[in-house]
Amino acid sequence: MATRQIMRRKVAARPADNRTGDLFAVTPAVPLAVPPIAPLPRTASVHRQLWLAVQLTALPLVAAAGDSRPCGVVAGEGGTRALVACNEAALRAGLSAGLALNAARARVPDLQIHERDLLLEQRHLARLARWALGFTPLVSIEAPDALLLEVQGSLRLLGGLDVLLQRVAVELQAQGHAALLGVAPAPRAALWLARAGGQPPVESQANLAGALAQLPLMATRWPARTLEDCTRLGVATLGELRRLPREGLARRFSPQLLDELDEAYGRRATPRRRYVAPERFEQRLELPAELGSTTALLPYCGRLLEALAQYLRERDRATATLTLMLLHRDARPACVRLGRALPTASAVEWQELLRERLGRTTLAAPVRALLLRSGPAVPASGTSGMLDGCGSGAAHAEAEAFALLDRLRARLGEQAISGVCLVAEHRPESAYRSLRPVPQPARASSVVPLLPATPRPLWLLALPEPLAERDGRPRHSGELRLESGPERIESGWWEGPEVQRDYYVARTSRGARLWIYRVRAGADARHWFLHGVFG
């Protein structure tokens, strides 16, 4: 027992860093304390992603809607006003982004100037984000002029990376946008590759460091003071910056620089805010000039309807209502509301209704902009075709009937077309109500509504008409002969004067059948009234 205790004391007295057991070994000096540096966690989930960055190079110009003449978008105040974007004509004239406004006017005296509208640019960016949802459900807006798309899960569906890049470039060009594309396993790396321009896609994490090493620091868009400090250090590329000691970078620069470097090289996972498309479509279109004719508005309305159709098709949705706002300079906006019995996502069908409605609309003032809003988006219902000779095509005929009703309503007004439905009420004048015709879902079993056992006329008078009487018997172009009755109806005590009537079917001397009643109580007690006419 004593021997074990002596051995334990010897083992405890041995220095932990002296593997030879030398009690006279020199203890290493304690290093100086340095500021804490963020750890470099590696998350395997980041490496399984593939990000596509879309860097829009002319977003301010597209938002300003410039034409073919030399024009530019300016920002800043006072003497610092400078060009932020130029069209092709201005570039050919020797202008470029960053040029002072005074210098630009000196070179091109007839240069068209547009003030930068950041709010309008963000609307365009959000519109492009909705378009990008057609490629992947994970889209992130990188303000102020870029989009990030996670496309790893969409490559097989879309035919591979090359096909995807070509399709994105073609569709962006069709929308009037110029863009640079970058592909990398990390979102910030893809964004920096896109800003550098002309960089090949990087699909593997193993090739990411080599691809980023050649990028100029300007692609990071770090503050000007940070870039100037890097230049004084003799650093021009990301590779040269990464070779510097990390402790020195932590002392000299802000922690955000190291965080962005770690994110770009895949060592730090930073969640991206997912763009969620609004539940309803809303888009504004600025007109190139004020228009005073509804006919001239139709082509621009068609552009909005095409955007609406694209929005609905991407979500497999349809809508039954639209609202078009006609915006004027010095007058209140005019509101044009359209509705359909059957929801649709077809721009052509909405265009037909809009043409009918605008044809009977008088403009209070010239229109400077259009704003289109959709109603609630509902799941699109597929329609089945009918082979020739295999059926009557009742569903197709019903759709055509409702399309006709929609056109009539657009031409004549909402109140001109209505339907009729039954109401569970004994009073004849309250047993029905008018409503907008809507398609009814097919029922598994036909249910016959409960109808009164006694006959009802097809036509009811808006107000019962008093009848002449002789010796207490009703007359109408002669004496009336009662054929059936009475049918007693007593109702309505909860919402007004109570109805107490005895109804009869009567026939005139000419053979017409009438529906008449006799009041049982009240001021008109014992008096006869005509209420309906049988067909």
Image (cartoon, rainbow, N blue to C red):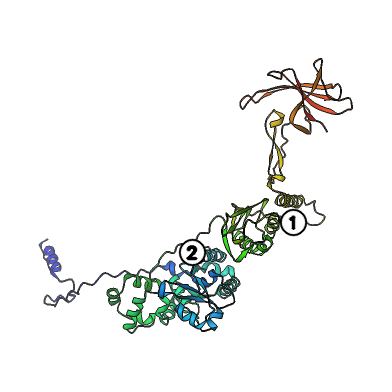
| Label 2: element kind | helix
Q: Foreground residue, 131 or 507?
A: 507
Residue pictured at 38% horizontal, 71% vertical: 260
**Residue at label 1?**
385
Residue assigned mark 2? 119
Label 1: few (<14), some (14–19) or many (≥20) C-alpha neighbours in 10 Å: few
Where, quadrant-wise, is the C terminus in this rendering?
top right
169 relative to 503, above or below = below
Label 2 environment density (alpha carbons within 10 Å; few <14, some 14–19, many ≥20): few
For marks 2 and 1, the one nearer the N-term is 2
> Tag 2: residue type?
Leu
Residue 202, above or below 336:
below
Q: Is mark 1 on a helix, strand or loop?
A: loop
Query: Which label lies toward us, 2 or 1?
Result: 2
The image shows a total of numbered marks equal to 2
**In the image, is residue 1 above or below residue 39?**
above
Is residue 297 in sight in this rendering?
yes
Determine the CA span between mark 2 and mark 1.
46 Å
Residue 464 at what x, y percent from top left? 74, 28
Is residue 208 left or right of 425 when viewed as pictured? left
Q: Where is residue 506 in the image (x, y as percent from the top left)?
A: 83, 24
Place residue 326 in its image quadrant. bottom right
Query: Which quadrant, please, contains the N terminus?
Result: bottom left
Residue 374 location in percent, x, y? 60, 55
